[in-house]
Every structure is written in C-alpha cells, then in structure tokens.
Image (cartoon, coloured by chain):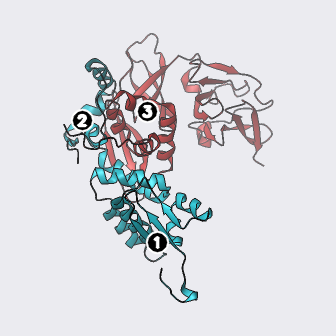
Amino acid sequence: MASSSKTEQKKMLILKSSEEEEFEIEESIAVQSGTIKNMVEDDFTLIPLPNVDTETLIKIIKYMKKHGEKTKSNEKDIEEFDKEFVKKSFTELKELVLAANYLHITSLIDLLCQAFADRIKNKSVKAIREIFGIPNDFTPEEEAEVYEQHKWAHEEGKEHIDHSAY
Amino acid sequence: MDIGQEGIHFPEEILMDILSRLPVRSLQRFKCVSPSWNALISARYFVMKHLSRSKSDLNSQKLLTIRRPTITKLEFTRYSFSSSSVQVIEDEQSLYWPPNCRPAWIIRCCYDGLVLISTIDTSDQRTNAPHLLLWNPSTRESILLPSRENALSDLVFGLGYDATSDDYKILAADVNGEDSLKEVSVEIFPLKTGSWRKIGKYPTGMHRVSDHLNYGMYSLTFIHGAFHWVGRSAYHTIISFNISNEVYGEIPLL
C-alpha cells in the first residue's frame, strides 16, 4: 500500500480474479460497480470476483479508470475510448458483458449491448446461431413456416446480409 | 462447425437488452434462429420493451407520407429522421391489400407506430364499402376492422393505448356530422374485443364546432390517457374521454 501524505490518502481496494490474481484500485473508481459498492458498504476491502477471469478483469478496470476520470471537458475523449473499447471479438465481448452484468456496471452493460446490437443486426440467421452458440431446434417444416410469416424481412435487401460469424 | 463459445450462456435479460436495440426487420429474421428466440421476440413483454426503447430514442423517429400522383396510384414513403438528417428508408412500400380493396386511402390517425387507414372499395360501384385498416408499417402486418354504419367521412378517429387493460383502442366520433344539433355519437373499438361499442352519456349541451378541420381535428388527439377534441356550448370547450374508465371531462376555453 502506498504511504502517501495523509491529505492525499485515497482508500484502495483489492480485486481478486477467478484465477486468484490481485489488482489494486481506488475505491472511488471501483464503486462504479454496484456489486463492489455493496461489498464496500459491508466493510470488504479485498473483493473476490470468482466469476471474472484475469484478462476480463484487466479490461474492466481499464474501463472504470477511464470513466472514473470523466469531466465536462473530456467527453469526446471518453467517447473515443468507448469506440475503441468495443472493437473486440464476439467471444471477448461476451465475457465482458457477463462480467459487467455480474458487477452491475450500468454504463458498461449499455455500451456492450449496443455494440452487440450494432454488429449483429445485418447478420444471417446461421451466423447468429454460431455467434451465440445456439443449436437449431427447429424442424425444417417449422423453420419454413416461421420464415414464410416474415418473408419480406428475409428477402428484401438480402444482398446486405452478412454471413460471417465475426 | 465451431460453436466455440462452449457453455457461455447469455442470461435472458442481457439477450433481451441486446435484441431490444435491433431494428424490426432484423428481429423478424431472427425469429428463425431457434424456437426459444422465436418465443422471446414474439412475447408481449419483449414487444413492449422494444417499443419503449424506440420511443425514447430520438434517432429512430419515423415519418410516413402518402402521395397520390394519379387517381389510381398511391405512394407511401417512410422516412427516418434524426437530429442531423432525414433519410428515405422505404419507398412505395408494398402493403398487403385486403381483397377487393383499391386505393382511396386516407391516413386517419396513428400511435405507437400503428396507422389507421380508411379505404374505399371503388371496384364495386354498388356498395362503395369503406374499409378501415389498422396497419403496422414496421412489421408489414395489418388487420381489417369490421365495417361501420356511419359514413366514414363523418367520423374523426383517435388511436391510443390503455395501460389498465393493456390494449389499444380506437375511438370514432362523428364530429363532422351534418346536423349540428344532433348529439355527437361516439364509439370505441378495443382491439382485444374486436368489435365496436357505442358510448353513451355525451356531455349535455355540447355540440359540434363548424368545420372541425379549422380546429386541426384531423384525428382525436390522444394524450395523458385520454382522447381530446373540441366542442361548443356557450363557449368552446375541449372534451376529453378517458381511455381506461371511459369518463368524459371538459376543459372550457374561456
């Protein structure tokens, strides 16, 4: 723990990932997470996060640190950070949104869900199944029926449909 | 096939959050992903969540225009507008015409992305039966409403949502009727019941204003859970009709 002068002393917390790695972070920044805030109110300073792996935790800490220093003048800067932050693979985004949900970081959940929505909206049905790991439980007849009901949505503008699962 | 994200299961609330941000067209396609996605997207709770998000998104406002370049041709155009631009999103959209319905379409009112349209069956000279159609341009679905007795030209319509019964309702008032002394007749059409019902006890002494269009009454305004229109007794008055408890109110314009 840093022994800075008394007037400068900020309360620090330790966050521990599922792989038992520890990270020091200012309490004022960490309480952007509702889950951590609750634990701090119950007097915890070592916060175990068994649902969040190290790699994901590092990214989340980075996000919280950036958003913790939000002022009126650096809005554009934070917007740029957010834009870059979501440029990740679907797998990484998934891990992040699950962690953000567990940690109750509302702004991050919002950012990630919007990023998902923007990236999947033009995807093909097959690509969606791959991205979300969903088996196709429809029988061919059932699927054909659902397809027919909204045929226009599939047929019109189908040249714009993106088949990649990335 | 690589379903690489083994065991990573999205909690339903996150999946709903993501899906509620998607345009309607994508959602209609994604109903084919799996039976559970089909159920989720079709669920009323999800539909209302999606609607509520759309309504609060200033960048997703839509405008529908109708043009009649020739007597037999009608053109619909949908625009989307945000604070910075107006864009055409759909041109001459195909609407599935009810059988024997020909254009002479008038947009009567709209609410929550639904549009009420009246059409005339001009193919049959004898009946010239007017039809009322409730149309959702986003999903391309439409319902033909049961026919009305009053001439549609006398009627002004309003469309609103009743949170108490979780139902959309259409109100029809013959504020354009010829006889200015005859009582205004009001009828309501709750979508869930599928039929028109007459409303009694019109405020006593209230009459029609002459030429409702002068008062901007192309439709009955729906706000704060009630339909509103202008009437006249000793002075002009705004008449309100609560969509849930069906109680009339009056706001005199002194």
Label 2 vs label 1, nearer the camera? 1
- Residue identifier under label 2: A126
Going from N to C along the chain, the mark reached first, 2 or 1, is: 1
Q: Is A33 placed left or right of B211 in the picture?
A: left
Label 1 vs label 3, nearer the camera? 1
Q: Secondary structure at mark 2?
A: helix
Looking at this view, is A9 or A14 the one in front? Answer: A14
Identify the chain drawn in cyan: A
Question: What's the mark number on residue B40?
Answer: 3
- Residue identifier under label 1: A25
Q: Residues within 10 Å of mark 3 (few under 14, many from 20)?
A: some
Q: Secondary structure at mark 1?
A: strand
The answer to whether marks 2 and 1 sit on the same chain is: yes
Residue type marked 1: Ile
* Quadrant of the image occupied by residue B98: top left
For the question of whether residue A32 can be seen, the reply is: no
Residue at point 46%, 72% (across, down): A25
Q: Secondary structure at mark 3?
A: helix
